[in-house]
Image (tube, grey):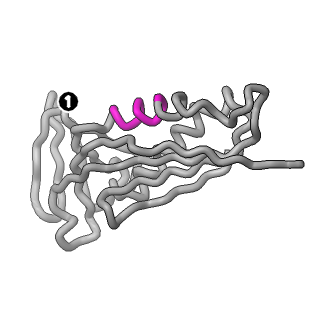
Amino acid sequence: MNQQITVEVSGIDFSAAHFVSEGGKCERLHGHNYQVAVLIWGKIDSLGMVIDFREIKRRVRLLSKKWDHHILLPQLSSLIKVNQKGNQVQVETPNGAYSFPTRDVKVLNVVETTAEELARVICQKLIEGLKADYPNLTQVRVVLSESPTAQAIVTMTM
């Protein structure tokens, strides 16, 4: 019998601020208390598990901690320009210019810092870290909620 088992961890959170350049009220600097849940599909290993829940939580917490209490900025946006000058990050948006201390900013390799893009980055980084150590895994899903009623779901095959 060829089984695929799914394991899930949730309740991992981080807080961050961002801009979204699509227009409207989200264009302004604002923040979220993000919630992360991860589902992983795979075959049961010799220890009777797909992957230890603690290992998933550890990896997701490490990723989330890097963004926690930071301003997340897109590196690839055509509307938001980000430049580092000394110990400051200068940001130009259609609504105005900002300057932040470098230590408070994470510039991400994304077009926008939307929930969809953040979930995709988390999913990719998880897969990169898990692939070599867990050949029994087949698929990873990241659910990133920015509010109780809004979430992005990204599923990738290993």
Above/below status of 86 relative to 5: above
Asked whether residue 145 is drawn in magenta, I would say no
Q: Front-most of 71 and 3?
A: 3
In the picture of the structure, the residue carrying the numbered disc 1 is 103
Above/below status of 28 relative to 8: below
Asked whether residue 60 is drawn in magenta, I would say yes
Horizontal arrangement in the rendering, residue 42 relative to residue 24 (left or right): right
Expressed as whole percent of the image width and height from the top left, the position of residue 73 reads 28, 47
Dot 1, how many residues are within 10 Å of its Cα: few (below 14), some (14-19), or many (20+)?
few
Q: Front-most of 7 and 80?
A: 7
Expressed as whole percent of the image width and height from the top left, the position of residue 153 reads 49, 59
Q: What segment carries the magenta color?
A: 58-65
Residue at screen point 30% across, 42% down: 14
**Of helix, strand and loop, which mostly describes the magenta segment?**
helix
Residue at screen point 51% across, 46% down: 38
Horizontal arrangement in the rendering, residue 154 relative to residue 144 (left or right): right
